[in-house]
Image (cartoon, coloured by chain):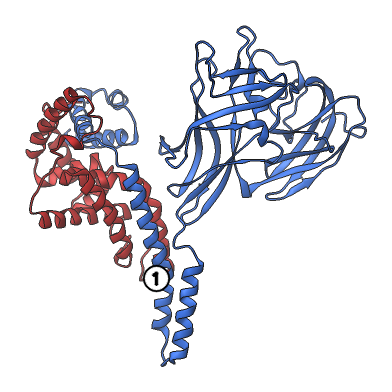
C-alpha cells in the first residue's frame, strides 16, 4: 500500500513538473486523494517560496560565454590532433606556414555562431483599392518554448510598420534574435491595439484610406492584443535560420457590420525563407477590369463558394494561401509559398469592388528557393478547377 | 554510445551538440537547484554558467551509459556547490535576503514572503541531507526519480521512499 502511494505520488510530481494541475492528479487517483493532497500542496508551497526567475541578462551573457567556448574548442581541437599526428620532425618553415594558416582561419571566421533567428515581416496585398495603408505597432515579440511565452529582449519595440509596403516580395527585418537551438512552431506579436472601448485618439494600429482619413483597428471580440504566428522552423545549434511572418492583411482586416469598426484578425504564417519558393509572371489583361488579383490555392482546395459574398467578419477567397495584385507594369508575384502544387484563381476588380472570377490556372509547381514563372492571359484561362 | 566503441571525434561532436541543445532548458533548472542549495541567486547563476563550461571541458570523460547528460550536469552542479561552500566556508540551503525575492515592491508583501521563507527554511532543515537533495532535484531540477537515483547512487524505489518521507515532514508546515 505504501509502495503504491510512493509510486502514485511520484507520478503526480512528474505530472505537476510537466504543467498538469494538482486537481487533475487528484481526480485520477480518488482513492488516494486525501493522502496525496497535503503532500502535493507542500510541493507547491516549497516551489512557490523558492520560485524566482533567472536574470535574462545574466543568462544571455552566460550563453554567449558558452558558445564562445564551444566555437574555440571546435577550432582548436582539429589543430591539436593534427600536431599530435605528426610522426616526423617538422621544419620551422612548415610551422610558420601552419601558424599563419591558423591565424588566417581564426581572423576570417567569426568566433562563434550562436543559434539565431532572423525574423522578417511581410504581407500580401489588399484587394480594396481605397485602402492605402495598414499600420501596425508592434510592442513586443515573443516565442513559445516548452509551453511558455518568452520575450525577444533584443527587439527594440515599439515599432510601426505599414503592411501594404511589405507585399509583392518586400519584407521588413524585425531583428536577429539569439535563442535556444531547437524546433519552434509559434511566435506571438504583442500589438498596441485596444480590445474594446472608444476610438483611441492616437491609435497604434490603424487603416488609412485614399482620402487620407484613418480608422483605428481593434482586437476581435474575445481576443487579445497578442497575435500568434504559426509554422514550424528549426533554429540550428551553431547557425542561423531566416523566417518570415506573413500577415496577409487582405484577410486580416475586417469591417464589422453593426459598429462600423475595423478589426484586425490575422492568420499569420511563419515561413522558413530557404524552404519557400514563389510564382511570378506577367498578366495580359483583355478585360475591362481595372485591377487583376491572382490568388494561390493549395492544389484541390478551391470550391465554388470561395468567391461568394462574405458574411459577417469573413473575407472573400478565405482559403487562399496568398495573393498578388497586377502591377502597373502588368506583372504579379506570389512569394513565400511552401514547396508544392498550387492552383491559381484570377479575379477582376473595379476600384476595389469585386467583379468576377475570370478563370483558373491549375497545377503550378513550386520548388524551394525557386521562382516558378507562370504568365497569365485572361483570354486563355481554364474555366473550372 | 560510448567513446570506446566509436570514433571519438564524432562522438565528442555529438556530445557537444547535445550539451548545446540542453543549455536553454537546463540552465534555469540548474540555476534553481544551485540557488536552493547556496541561497544566493546571483552566485547561483555564476555557478550555473561555470557548470556548462566545465561540462564542455570534461566531455571526454562523459559516458552516456553511466548517467544521462542532464543528470551529469546536476552532478557537476552538486560538486561545484560543495566547492563553493569550501571556498566561502559557509553553508546555506535557502535564500535569506529579501532583496533576492522576486516581486517584492510592496514592503508588506516582502515581510509576508520572508516569514513564509523562514517557515519553509525551518521545515527543510528537518530533512536529512539526502532527502533535501531528492526534493531539490525533483522539485527544481525537474528530474525523474530514476535520474535522481542515478546521481545519488540509489534505486528508484529508495528515491521514491525518501521523497514521500520528506514530503510527509513538510506536510502541514508548508502549504501552497
Camera sees residue B153:
no
Neighbor class of circle 1 (other Cα within 10 Å; few <14, some 14-19, many 20+) is: few
Q: Is residue A133 left or right of residue B44?
A: right
Name the spot of residue B41 as percent of width and height, x first.
Answer: 22, 43
Q: Secondary structure at mark 1?
A: helix
Q: Is residue B128 left or right of residue A100?
A: left
Q: Is residue A223 left or right of residue B164?
A: right
- In depth, the one of A266 and A92 nearer the eye is A92
* In this view, A141 is above or below A314: below
Which quadrant of the rendered structure holds the C terminus of chain A? top right
* In this view, B94 is above or below A313: below
What residue do we see at 48% from left, 69% from top?
A: A107
- In the image, the chain rendered in blue is A
Q: Which picture quadrant has residue A284?
A: top right
Disc 1 marks which residue?
A: B8
What residue do we see at 48% from left, 35% from top?
A: A157
- In the image, the chain rendered in red is B
- In depth, the one of A301 and B87 nearer the eye is B87
Q: Is residue A221 left or right of residue B147?
A: right
Chain at tag 1: B
What residue do we see at 32% from left, 67% from top?
A: B60
What residue do we see at 91% from left, 24% from top?
A: A288
Q: Which picture quadrant has residue A333?
A: top right
Residue ranking furthest to the top: A258
Name the spot of residue A133 as percent of width and height, x first.
Answer: 66, 26
Amino acid at each position: 500500500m505504501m509502495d503504491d502511494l510512493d509510486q502514485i505520488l511520484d507520478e503526480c510530481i512528474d505530472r505537476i513538473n510537466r504543467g498538469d494541475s494538482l486537481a487533475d492528479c487528484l481526480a485520477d487517483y480518488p482513492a488516494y486523494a486525501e493522502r496525496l493532497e497535503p503532500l502535493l500542496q507542500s510541493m507547491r508551497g516549497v516551489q512557490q517560496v523558492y520560485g524566482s526567475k533567472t536574470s535574462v541578462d545574466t543568462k544571455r551573457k552566460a550563453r554567449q560565454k558558452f558558445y564562445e567556448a564551444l566555437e574555440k574548442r571546435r577550432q582548436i581541437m582539429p589543430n591539436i590532433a593534427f600536431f599530435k599526428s605528426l610522426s616526423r620532425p617538422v621544419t620551422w618553415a612548415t610551422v610558420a606556414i601552419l601558424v599563419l594558416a591558423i591565424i588566417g582561419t581564426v581572423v576570417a571566421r567569426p568566433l562563434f555562431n550562436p543559434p539565431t533567428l532572423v525574423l522578417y515581416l511581410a504581407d500580401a496585398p489588399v484587394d480594396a483599392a481605397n485602402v492605402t495603408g495598414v499600420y501596425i505597432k508592434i510592442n513586443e515579440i515573443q516565442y513559445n518554448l516548452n509551453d511558455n511565452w518568452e520575450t525577444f529582449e533584443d527587439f527594440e519595440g515599439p515599432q510601426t510598420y505599414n503592411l501594404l509596403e511589405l507585399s509583392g516580395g518586400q519584407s521588413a527585418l524585425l531583428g536577429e534574435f539569439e535563442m535556444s537551438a531547437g524546433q519552434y512552431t509559434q511566435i506571438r506579436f504583442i500589438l498596441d491595439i485596444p480590445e474594446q472601448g472608444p476610438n483611441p485618439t492616437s491609435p497604434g494600429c490603424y487603416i488609412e484610406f485614399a482620402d487620407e482619413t484613418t480608422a483605428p483597428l481593434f482586437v476581435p471580440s474575445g481576443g487579445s492584443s497578442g497575435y500568434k504566428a504559426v509554422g514550424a522552423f528549426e533554429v540550428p545549434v551553431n547557425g542561423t535560420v531566416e523566417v518570415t511572418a506573413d500577415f496577409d492583411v487582405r484577410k486580416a482586416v475586417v469591417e464589422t457590420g453593426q459598429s462600423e469598426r475595423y478589426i484586425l484578425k490575422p492568420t499569420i504564417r511563419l515561413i522558413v525563407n530557404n524552404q519557400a519558393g514563389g510564382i511570378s509572371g506577367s498578366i495580359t489583361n483583355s478585360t475591362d477590369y481595372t485591377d487583376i488579383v491572382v490568388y494561390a490555392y493549395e492544389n484541390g482546395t478551391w470550391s465554388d463558394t470561395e468567391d461568394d459574398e462574405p458574411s459577417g467578419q469573413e473575407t472573400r477567397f478565405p482559403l487562399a494561401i496568398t495573393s498578388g495584385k497586377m502591377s502597373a507594369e502588368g506583372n504579379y508575384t506570389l512569394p513565400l509559398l511552401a514547396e508544392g502544387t498550387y492552383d491559381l484563381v484570377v479575379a477582376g476588380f473595379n476600384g476595389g469592388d469585386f467583379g468576377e472570377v475570370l478563370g483558373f490556372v491549375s497545377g503550378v509547381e513550386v520548388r524551394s528557393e525557386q521562382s516558378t514563372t507562370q504568365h497569365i492571359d485572361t483570354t486563355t484561362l481554364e474555366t473550372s478547377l | 554510445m560510448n567513446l570506446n566503441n566509436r570514433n571519438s571525434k564524432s562522438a565528442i561532436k555529438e556530445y557537444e551538440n547535445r550539451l548545446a541543445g540542453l543549455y536553454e532548458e537546463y540552465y534555469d533548472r540548474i540555476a534553481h537547484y544551485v540557488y536552493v542549495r547556496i541561497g544566493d541567486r546571483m552566485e547561483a547563476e555564476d555557478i550555473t554558467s561555470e557548470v556548462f563550461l566545465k561540462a564542455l571541458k570534461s566531455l571526454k570523460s562523459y559516458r552516456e551509459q553511466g548517467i544521462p547528460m542532464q543528470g551529469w550536469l546536476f552532478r557537476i552542479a552538486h560538486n561545484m556547490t560543495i566547492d563553493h561552500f569550501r571556498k566561502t566556508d559557509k553553508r546555506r540551503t535557502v535564500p535569506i535576503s529579501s532583496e533576492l525575492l522576486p516581486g517584492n515592491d510592496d514592503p508588506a508583501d516582502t515581510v509576508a514572503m520572508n516569514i513564509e521563507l523562514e517557515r519553509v527554511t525551518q521545515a527543510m532543515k528537518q530533512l536529512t541531507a539526502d532527502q533535501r537533495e531528492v526534493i531539490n532535484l525533483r522539485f527544481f531540477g525537474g528530474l525523474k526519480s530514476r535520474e535522481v537515483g542515478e546521481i545519488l547512487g540509489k534505486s528508484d524505489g529508495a528515491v521514491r521512499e525518501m521523497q514521500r518521507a520528506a514530503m510527509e515532514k513538510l506536510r502541514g508546515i508548508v502549504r501552497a
